[in-house]
Amino acid sequence: MIVRVRWNTHYRYSNPVELLHTELRVEPVDRPGTQRVIESRLLTKPPATIAAHEDVFGNRVAHLDFLEAVSDLEVGLSADVETSGAPEPASTLSPLLARLYVQPTTRAPFDDAFNAFVPAVAGEGRLAFAEALNRHLHAEFVYEVGASDVGHTARDVARSGRGVCQDFAHLMLAILRAREIPARYVSGYLAAPGEAIEANASHAWVQVLEGDAWHGLDPANGVPQDEHYVVAAVGRDYDDVPPLRGTYTGAASESWTTHLEVDSNSQQ
Amino acid sequence: MLARVAENLYWLGRLLERADNMARLTDVSFAANVEAAPPMGADEAVVAALGQRRAFEEAREHDPDLDARAYLVFSAEHAGSLRSTVRGARSLARETREHLSREVFEELNRLYLELERAASVADPDSDFALQAFCSTVKHSTSAIQGLIDNTMLVTEGTSWLRCGVALERADMTSRMIDTKYFVLLPEAADVGGPIDRFQWMVLLRSVSALEAYRKRYRGGVSGPNVARLLIYDRGFPRSLVSSVNALVAAYEEATRETPSARRRRALREILMLQLDLEAGTVDVAIEQGLHEFLDEVQRRLALTNEALAADLFRAIPEGVAG
Amino acid sequence: MSELYDGYIVGQGIDEMFAPDGSVRAPYASFLERTRGWDGARYRDREEAAGLETLNNGITFTVYSESLGTERIFPFSLIPRIIEHQEWARVERGLIQRVTALNRFLADLYDQQQVIADGIVPGPLVLDHPGYQLSMVGVRAPLGTHVHIAGIDLIRDIEGEFRVLEDNLRTPSGVSYVIENRRTMATSVPEVFPREGVGPVVDYPERLLEALIEVAPPGAPETPRVVILTPGAANSAYFEHSFLARQMGIELVEGRDLLVHEERVYLRSTTGLERVDVIYRRVDDEFIDPLAFRPDSMLGVPGLMSAYRAGNVTLVNAVGNGVADDKAVYRYVPDLVRYYLNEEPILRNVDTYVGWREDDLEYMLDHLDELVSKPTDASGGYGIVVGPQASPRDLDALRLNIRSDPRRWVAQPVQEFSTIPSFDGDHFEPRRSDLRPFVVTGASSWVLPGGLTRVARDRESYIVNSSQGGGSKDTWVLAPRGGHAAGPLPEEVD
């Protein structure tokens, strides 16, 4: 399937700001066996030279800056990605990644209270457990826009019983990792017809390492990752993969609007 | 050179010169006080000359016994005191130490240590302690300026220091003349009277100009002649014209490699100032209003200061130089 | 010998000047000869002169706890630590060996972590460490050097052997005091120096600058621009930052003086933007780039890590060294020497037991009453239990604590270390002392002869920190017998 992502964010500053630096983790990269980037372009207004590096998780991190004062910044991504829906083959993890993906984080801490959300009956093996957990969390928790805010952790969602996709993902990661199942947070795009939650939107889900592949599971929707999903970045939790992060100097307040369109063409 | 360091050196020059002037003024006010009883108010005159009259009056509302000299010299709370000025200079010197010679830093550091010591003794505000300290400051700041000339390589940094010294000196001199004319003398009718002459002499002594005056002019002290000496006399190093000439020279030296866009605005102000002083005479200035004339001088100096901060010290440079 | 040494008693430990039988040790023989006949008044005068010089020169450090950060001078004592050439040569080799292994270790940790895969160091010990910086992973430090400036703290133990007490691999300070102490000695007591001279310290800035130039990025100009990045004048080590900038003739910059544009670092000068190639930074990792680390940092330069990663600027020391100078990782350094260099460590550690190792843990739990137990995640002495002074109840509580979280704990035997005479205004008294040599590494390593000798404030104290009122001394490395260390007296520093 070919998924087309058109993403645009527009920042406005109440006063011109100086030394504006921005890091973006929005561009999909080739992930052999599961997604191939046909075309990807990142553009800004005012125009800037965009550099990029690969971070410790293998993500493409783009960065740009402006020497002159800026009061308006638009960043746009246009990407066409061919997806297969298959699990992503994993090579042997370095000792570092092997450690990072089983460790608790601020947003996905270990907490015995989370045991209450473990399904009573789960199949044999890690993957079966993760799949059962995926369905169970979807059934137990209420998806509610506005039920979460930027600082939320798995504890908040466990307490309130409601949240958005990233909250579901954090809770699921905490439960998996507490059982020493390596798992990672995924941010990306979902092009799904019909009723799916956060379809045509920026999305977050989970991947579990089993055997020699990363298997995607989407607890907000209770389904596995299929060809409608495009991976933008992976990490331990949201804090490793925020789509945009920046700094500037100047006394100004910042506001922004984001627009995203994701659609698919299954005819190829 | 780093823009921040240039700015710090410029301000170091200003504060050193300011400390020197404050010490001179305060020192002279003692002499005046000994010889003439209050309504003359030499202390208040100093406060006024330093442009701190309003702040002082406010402070006095809280503390009616506040002594003008204590306020001006050892007060740690008052940001405009001599103590705060020396502390400020020393802290700038610490931050720019790698641009100063060891001797310059050590002399200023000694002055600072001496100030802190003097301020901590039992009765720092006694006349003797105040006078002794003012005298230390005068000698020390002169020594520092001498050391800058004698021990430091002529670099962009020393030029910024000199810019600060020259601009501050011009500002102080114009302010002192202005104060004498319009603040001190209660009645216009007193012009030329004994109080008037006494005040002119105090003013001359505060800038170490009494002897110079005697050498230049015969007869008694007269206002127009004092103004002529302090504004237009190129032979007198603290005159406005000498200070502004020094400012122009130091600024041109400091900004020799600075792109025109960054140096232009301040340069225009000080060149205009130089032109006014070179072309003018004291008679014309008095006829057109000395106060207005001095006001214009101070306005240009303030604009220069602003332009330096905005265009040179703080602005993000446009192009990439190296 | 002067009667000022009458009543000088060597404590339980060992003394640098006197053997237990009261005889003078060889390195001090000539020194005592030269000061024969000096009376108390003379020492008092000279120490006073030295103190005044220090104060006028503004050689101060800032004490934060007092109001508004008061500046203090670092008390200076005229009797030097004196080390024989032979012994120093061995220490020097040991230090270079240790720093070489630590450099290899850091390069490995930020690359493939082979040392963990091979089971030399427990993975979680280093990978979960707050000093392990993920943003450093994959960054190639030029020449593979991560630790350009190391301060390795040594003590002389009861057997007379120098041992490593602690590695400082982030922003070790103190070298300015070494140079200034030598200058002070040369001006206040020039007549006590041996005729053959002592190992020179005055060329440290030159050596450091050479190393900084060596590690410049490959694309840098032939004379790269090197700067020192300081947190500012309020920092406790500001004097040193400014001192080194002056001595090397390079700019001392603050974060706001630099900016990053398109992955290149520039400084803001009066004439425009100027490229910067090497930054000797004295700002901690967490503060150097608000984009990569603490977003609230006002001290850093946004985007600096991106320029570093792109290989357009070199940071000195490298980012992420904190993982290698940890209390528990210290235990493994001798193993790292064997692993990376295939050599036996020349300098030994102080015996240390870590809760990470089962054999160590067992020993710790059996000998709590003899050991000093320390939590690894606390500093400033918090949580330390001194076994011989603890009650049985305290020890029981400690045992429970260690059992419940053994990896948080390390333990060491009570460590006695050597004393050096200090003048107390009246006569000489022993003071415990340590030694921090400095190792500079660019393409190769160089050790400053001697280092910073710190002494405790009073006779009983084991603490040599300046913040605790400790002082410092000049440190002499003697010339080889029949040779010259450096020619005559040290030259004027400025």
Image (spheres, coloured by chain):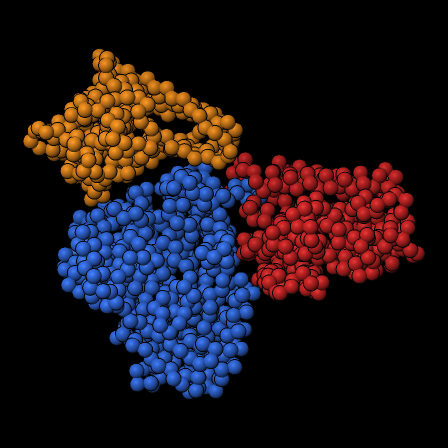
Q: Give me the residue at 15% from left, 39% from top.
A: A180
Q: Is residue B99 visible?
A: no
Query: Residue A66, relative to residue B86: is it above or below?
Result: above
The hue in which chain A appears in the rendered picture of the protein: orange
Query: Toward the viewer: A218 or C387?
Result: C387
Q: Give me the residue at 63% from left, 44% from top.
A: B255
The hue in which chain C appears in the rendered picture of the protein: blue
Q: Position of residue A85 (x, y in %)?
A: 18, 22
Question: C146 left or right of A184?
Answer: right
The hue in which chain B appears in the rendered picture of the protein: red
Q: Position of residue B207 (x, y in %)?
A: 77, 55
Q: Position of residue B218 (x, y in %)?
A: 92, 57
Query: Toward the viewer: A225 or B295?
Result: B295
Query: Residue B105, relative to residue B306: is it above or below?
Result: below
Quadrant position of residue C9: bottom left
Q: Give me the residue at 54% from left, 73% from top.
A: C49
In this view, which residue lies farthest toward the left? A124
Q: Give me the residue at 25% from left, 67% from top.
A: C389
Q: Position of residue A107 (x, y in %)?
A: 27, 35
